[in-house]
Amino acid sequence: MTRFALTLEFDGSPFMGLQRQPHGPSVQQAVEEAAERVTGETITLHSAGRTDTGVHALAMRSHVDVAKEITPFRLMEALNAHLRPDPIAVIHCEVVPDDWHARFSCIGRRYRYRIANRRAPLTLQRGRAWQVPQELDHEAMHKAAQALVGRHDFTTFRSAHCQAQSPVKTLDQLDVRREGEEVIAEVAARSFLHHQVRSMVGCLALVGMGRWRVEQVAEALEARERQALGLNAPPDGLYFVEAIYP
């Protein structure tokens, strides 16, 4: 049995998330079915993250165990052939030790959130960014974001359906910058709560619009209750960027 690490890129728009779901298509199901057609084996995909419905990935790290003799290049090429026309691509494949695990060996995860800050309708970026027509003050957003960095109880920014045992997480980075018409949030932590990134970005957008004071983000955090959340950003603009390993 050989363990292969896969790096996946995908458009999350047609999927109910990465994990298998009983009520709709998932990235995991698509990759597992492609792998089973390639190998003739029952394959389970393990991944570093569990992206929600509509969330995208630039480089999701995953792994599969395969008994069949096959090289990483041949496996990657065969998977990509069988994944068509689904918007999923294996962009890297390598053999890893048997004790390496895509999820449990991961010590950090990075996400990016893209806001298209323009009035004109989206064409090329439709479904791949959150459109906010009001002018956003990205500097105020960045300033407000710094109150969330560090170890906190993130109950306010946690989905009611979150299955994590504790709402306490350590946020390593939350930077907001502007690139032309785009406002981009870069977020990093060891792990995240369900909807945490989208909830934080939604509240920061309220600051950028001038509907919230800069201090209100810290106040919402201190409230430790979901009712204090101002806005949950849509999944369109969220991308899993990187899984970090020792």
Image (spheres, grey):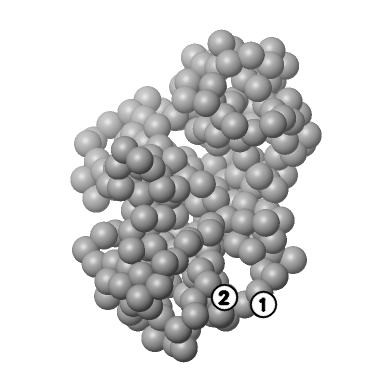
User: What is the tally of numbered marks visible in this picture?
Assistant: 2
Q: Which residue is mark 1?
A: 97
Can see residue 140?
Answer: no
Q: Is residue 124 above or below residue 138?
A: below
* Other-residue count near label 2 (Cα within 10 Å), few / some / many at <14 / 14–19 / ≥20: some
Q: Is residue 243 above or below residue 99?
A: above
Disc 2 marks a residue whose amino acid type is Arg
* Other-residue count near label 1 (Cα within 10 Å), few / some / many at <14 / 14–19 / ≥20: few
Residue sitting nearer the eye, 138 or 42? 42
- Name the element at disc 2: strand
Residue 109 is situated, as x and y percent measured from the top left of the image, at 62, 52
Residue 130 position by quadrant: top left
User: Mark 2 or mark 1: which comes first in sequence?
Assistant: 2
Residue 168 is situated, as x and y percent measured from the top left of the image, at 74, 31
The N terminus lies in quadrant: bottom right
Can see residue 76?
Answer: yes
